[in-house]
Image (cartoon, rainbow, N blue to C red):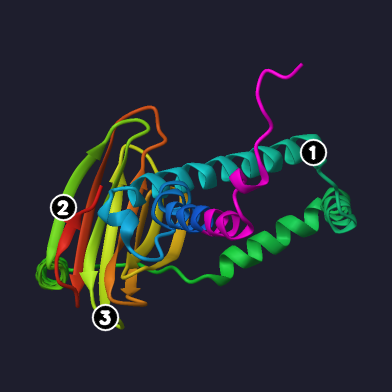
């Protein structure tokens, strides 16, 4: 006894309908993968939709956290290997011979020391007050020149504070091939950073560091877009960062 009747062959979907449904499902899955999954999970934004939807920042944070976890594991393994293989101090044969020679002939050693001392002529170093004043003037002039040069070098300067576990991002708008100079330093502890760029569906990572107190150099844009730094504080206290930039770029913006 059947509760329902079996469908007739005419009521079943045709092969063409099944193929169209499968193709439509594949297209929808591809669109979701490109616009949502890749930007939000892996910071990959091939068509720029992830940045428009605000998902690319989420992916960058997840990628950064994953890389930091891998670095933590690698550092812990390296530390464990060093602890398990302690190095014992070794006494070389030359040290033994030198010690034996000194103990066997102390009189000869004393004579050689007296000769070495007597061979050095007595010298009296006299530095006039005029020379001291001239040296101070030259040092002050050099410091003033250096300060003026630094002020002319940097176009923008920003200071910010990161609480424990907090991250932030500053980027420069740059044209392809443009070169910007930078220098940043942290007060309160070292930072984890990722120097990278994105724009027009492109993305690149220039340099990454863990536990770095300061850094400086040049940043050359691989393509037209936004290029800069992601900082994260992994210390147990607040860290203040001073970032200075100069060179060929448009604007310095806080991206995150």
Q: Considering only order in the chain, which callout, 3 or 1, is on the residue closer to the N terminus?
A: 1
User: Could you tell me residue 116's position as x and y percent?
Assistant: 62, 66
Q: Residues within 10 Å of mark 1 (few under 14, many from 20)?
A: few
Residue 148, label in figure: none
- CB of mark 3 within 8 Å of CB of mark 2? no
Q: Circle 1 is placed at which residue position?
A: 86
User: Could you tell me residue 222's position as x and y percent?
Assistant: 37, 77
Residue 178, label in figure: 3
Q: Nearer the viewer, mark 1 or mark 3?
A: 3
Q: Residue at x 89, y 56 (%)?
A: 97
Vertical comparison of 179 with 217: above or below: below
Q: Circle 2 is placed at which residue position?
A: 158
Where disc 1 sits, the SS reads: loop
Q: Nearer the viewer, residue 256 or 124?
A: 256
Asked if residue 3 lies in the magenta stretch, the reply is yes
Q: Residue at x 42, y 36 (%)?
A: 234
User: Could you tell me residue 35's position as x and y percent?
Assistant: 39, 55
From where the camera sits, is residue 212 visible?
no
Q: Is residue 82 left or right of residue 34?
A: right
Distance of label 2 from label 1 (alpha carbons): 45 Å
Distance of label 1 from label 3 (alpha carbons): 50 Å
Q: Is residue 18 left or right of residue 187?
A: right
Q: Residue at x 63, y 42 (%)?
A: 75
* Magenta part of the chain: 1-23
Q: Nearer the viewer, residue 152 or 94?
A: 152
- In the rendered image, the quadrant that contains the N terminus is top right
Q: Residues within 10 Å of mark 3 (few under 14, many from 20)?
A: some
Q: Considering only order in the chain, which callout, 2 or 3, is on the residue closer to the N terminus?
A: 2
């Amino acid at each position: 006894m059947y509760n329902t009747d079996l469908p007739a062959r005419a009521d079943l979907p045709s092969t063409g309908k099944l193929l169209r449904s499968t193709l439509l499902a594949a297209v929808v899955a591809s669109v979701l993968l490109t616009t949502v999954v890749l930007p939000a999970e892996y910071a990959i934004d091939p068509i720029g939709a992830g940045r428009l939807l605000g998902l690319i920042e989420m992916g960058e944070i997840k990628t950064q956290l994953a890389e930091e976890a891998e670095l933590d594991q690698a550092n812990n393994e390296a530390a464990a290997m060093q602890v398990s293989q302690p190095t014992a101090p070794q006494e070389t044969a030359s040290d033994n011979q030198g010690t034996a020679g000194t103990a066997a002939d102390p009189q000869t050693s004393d004579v050689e020391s007296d000769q070495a001392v007597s061979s050095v002529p007595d010298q009296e170093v006299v530095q006039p007050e005029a020379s001291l004043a001239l040296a101070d003037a030259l040092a002050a002039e050099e410091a003033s020149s250096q300060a003026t040069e630094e002020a002319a070098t940097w176009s923008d300067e920003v200071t910010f504070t990161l609480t424990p576990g907090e991250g932030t991002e500053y980027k420069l708008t740059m044209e392809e091939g443009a070169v910007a100079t930078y220098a940043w330093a942290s007060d309160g502890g070292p930072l984890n950073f990722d120097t990278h760029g994105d724009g027009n569906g492109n993305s690149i990572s220039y340099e990454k560091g863990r536990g770095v107190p300061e850094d400086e150099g040049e940043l050359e844009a691989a393509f037209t877009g936004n290029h800069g730094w992601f900082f994260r504080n992994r210390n147990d206290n607040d860290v203040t960062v001073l970032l200075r930039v100069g060179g060929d770029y448009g604007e310095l913006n806080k991206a995150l």
